[in-house]
Image (cartoon, helix red, strand yellow):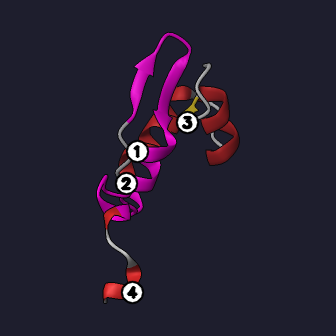
């Protein structure tokens, strides 16, 4: 896949250590990662993995406040 934020089935295979696409998908779903099914196997994005880990992307207005106001 072309986007640097997309984790392809091959990427997920290397990360999880599982070989079968069904095992890769099961592993990720059990950990709360949203997975999409593609022709070449399951795929997801780095943002969805981070979200499952409790990390949230920065809000658009995060940069609006100067840290010195706190």
Say if mark 4 contacts mark 2, CB within 8 Å. Answer: no
Can residue 54 be seen here? The reply is no
Say if mark 3 contacts mark 4, CB within 8 Å. Answer: no
Q: Earlier in the sequence, mark 4 or mark 2?
A: 2
Q: Earlier in the sequence, mark 3 or mark 4?
A: 3
Q: Earlier in the sequence, mark 1 or mark 3?
A: 3
Q: CA distance from mark 4 to mark 2?
A: 29 Å
Q: CA distance from mark 1 to mark 3?
A: 10 Å
Magenta residues? Answer: 35-63
Say if mark 1 contacts mark 3, CB within 8 Å. Answer: no
Residue at 58% x, 26% y is 3
Q: What secondary structure is found at the residue carrying circle 3?
A: loop
Query: Around disc 3, counting alpha carbons within 10 Å, would you say few (fewer than 14), some (14 to 19), or many (20 or more)?
Result: few
Picture layout, residue 52 above or below residue 37: below
Say if mark 1 contacts mark 2, CB within 8 Å. Answer: yes
Nearer to us of marks 3 and 4 is 4
Mark number for residue 5?
A: 3
Mark number for residue 51?
A: 2
Q: Dividing the image into 4 quarters, which one contains the C terminus?
A: bottom left
Write down the residue under mark 1: 48
Nearer to us of marks 4 and 1 is 4
């Amino acid at each position: 896949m072309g986007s640097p934020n997309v984790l392809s089935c091959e990427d997920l295979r290397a990360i999880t250590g599982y070989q079968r696409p069904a095992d890769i998908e099961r592993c990720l779903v059990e950990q709360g990662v949203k997975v999409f099914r593609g022709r070449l196997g399951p795929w997801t994005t780095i943002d969805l993995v981070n979200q499952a880990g409790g990390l949230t992307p920065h809000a658009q207005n995060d940069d609006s406040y100067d840290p010195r106001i706190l």
